Image: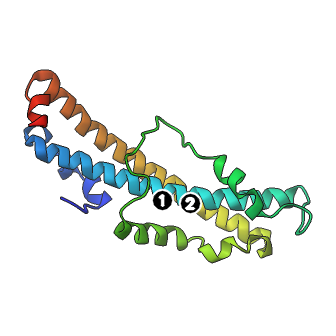
Amino acid sequence: MPGLSLDVVLGPAFLSGLEQLPMPDLRSKRDQCAELETELSYLRRLAQARIDLIAEELRHRDVGLGAGEAESLVEHLPKILAENTRSEGPGRLTALFAPAEEAQASLVARVEAVCPSEQLGSLDELPSSRLDALLAQLIDLEREVSSERKALHSVLGRIENELVRRYKSGEATVDALLS
């Protein structure tokens, strides 16, 4: 089952017959969801970093700080990127913090389509109207990804509930897992 798409995992067939699945298949589905969660979390972090940088540039402009009058965004980078490190909702600590290399390219491309990396070094040269447009597009992307993550968490929750049910009922045992 490696490499399933989000559309497949969120489709009704993915959870169909969950109660009858053998334990290895159920665990495989859980692992697939965890892999997709890592990918979506990574994508959200990429979008959020750009949002934070653009918002900081706009804030500088709002308070009347021009080029040379304020420290550059690069000098503020650690502070800017540290401000929004936790999203809303019950956080899940993932075992992986970045997706597999083959998935990274498509995830990065999704963010690059909205705001290419090359633009990040010259935000101070872009007109405010362009920054506002970029910010709006990135916020839309971040909301879309957050919605996808929420739907994925629902699927993952159903799988985890089935695993817990089996252990509680005795259908599955820790001893079987260890052998």
Q: Is disc 1 in contact with disc 2, using a CB cutoff of under 8 Å? A: yes
In the image, 175 versus 111, the foreground residue is: 175
* Residue extending farthest front: 179
**Quarter of the image with the N terminus in it:** bottom left
In the displayed structure, 82 sits above or below 175; it is: below
In the image, 102 versus 5, the foreground residue is: 102
Kindly identify the amino acid type of the residue bearing the numbered disc 1. Answer: Leu
Q: Is residue 20 shown to the viewer in this render?
A: yes
Find disc 2 in the rendering and name its residue. 47
Q: Could you tell me which secondary element the residue under label 1 belongs to?
A: helix
Kindly identify the amino acid type of the residue bearing the numbered disc 2. Answer: Ala
**Quarter of the image with the C terminus in it:** top left
Q: Is residue 173 shown to the viewer in this render?
A: no
Residue at coordinates 91% horizontally, 59% vertically from top-left? Answer: 64
Quick check: 86 left or right of 162? right
Residue at coordinates 42% horizontally, 72% vertically from top-left? Answer: 105
The count of marks equals 2
Question: Residue 66 location, x and y as percent?
Answer: 90, 66
Instruction: Specify the quadrant of the image occupied by residue 92.
Output: top left
The numbered dot on residue 154 is: none
